[in-house]
Image (cartoon, coloured by chain):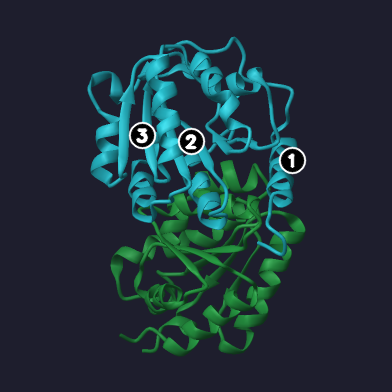
Chain colours: A cyan, B green
Amino acid sequence: MRRVDALKAVYPELDQAIVVTIMGAVAAELQSIGPRPNFFYLQHAMGLASSVGLGIALARPELAVVVFDGDGSLLMNLGGLTTLARYRPRNLVHVVFDNESLLSVGGFPTATSTGSDLAGIAKAAGVPNTTTVRDLDGFRAAFADARKSGDLCTIVAKVDAVGPSAYVTDLSLLENRYQFARHLKERAPEGKP
Amino acid sequence: MPVSTQNSSLIYRGLKDAGVRIVSALPETWLVHLIRMAEDDPDMTLVRLAKEEEGVGISTGAHLAGVKSAMLMQNHGFLAAVNGIVSCGQLYRIPLLMLISQRGSFGERDPWQCEGGGVTEHVLEALRIPFDRLEAPEHVGKRIAKAQTLAYAASRPVALLLSRDLMWED
């Protein structure tokens, strides 16, 4: 399964969601499908996408939050999984694209290439629903189930170690950040937050 | 425990007056009362972290979502969070309000706290993070309010150092 195809498979469902992605290939591929003001691409700070998602989910429980994480990023913030599980935001779906490598820096293999099981780690951290999927149908079904479940889910999607030809897009970091914040403001219920 | 309950209350009141609704924290001795106050307050969301850098992400998410937050940490936790502060807080112009207990200053008895005490202010300066000290009860509320005002005006992280004179009653 290619990550870009997985993103395309669930893209129509992201219309109303608040989406936080990690840097690099995930951000570039999601932008290539079509940028939206409800997408925030955390273009650095490896590991913190899930923490940013948790912050949004706790601040705005009425919103459905989707985090697109990666194996290299999640491995940098495994402690954050325990925090995510501890506060168990019912409005957050955590997708981890696991290509078993740090692709953007030349394909350095991560520990998932030698057997570390991120869904197993998430489950042991206390995430109530975890699964590993390996094909598009499986990913589409797991994503739909997670969105319907009304509870925290971590979906580990095993993907090919292929990415876009370029990582820098014409959307500047701050343009994205301010558009996204404005979108969240416009989505705020009357008088809140 | 000689951590000042009274001055912890003043700091907590300052955070409440500043409209803070989410506090992330990693426990350390000087912060125990503050963390308990946040936990006991039904209008506050306390996020207990595994590592301080997560707090940068949580405060970033909260800010983008329109909610004011603060981070409570020891200076060694601040040092552990530096990349997040730079690569998320500063890169994305997030008004992080960081309250940092300044361990390892004059009066410190724990040998393991002393290195961090010597470098914290230099690191803050190197990062160009505006900071001030909370040393006496009478300026706690005002300095918290001013720190937050600058954080929002500049759209940048700021820090308040919690000093031994304020936090510890020997």
Left or right of A58, for residue A127:
left
- Of residue A133 and residue B84, the one placed in the foreground of this image is A133
Q: Is residue B41 above or below residue A3?
A: below
Spatial separation of the CA atoms under disc 1 and disc 3: 29 Å
State whether residue A70 appears in this view: no
Which chain's residue wears label 1? A
- According to the picture, the residue beneath numbered tag 2 turns out to be A46
Which chain's residue wears label 3? A
Q: Position of residue B39 (x, y in %)?
A: 41, 73
Q: Amino acid at mark 1?
A: Gln
| Tag of residue A75 | 3
Tell me whether marks 1 and 3 sit on the same chain: yes
- Of residue A35 and residue A165, the one placed in the foreground of this image is A35
Q: Residues within 10 Å of mark 3 (few under 14, many from 20)?
A: some
Among numbered discs 1 and 2, the one appearing first in the sequence = 2
Among numbered discs 2 and 3, the one appearing first in the sequence = 2
Q: Is residue B78 above or below residue A24?
A: below
Left or right of A149, for residue A31:
right
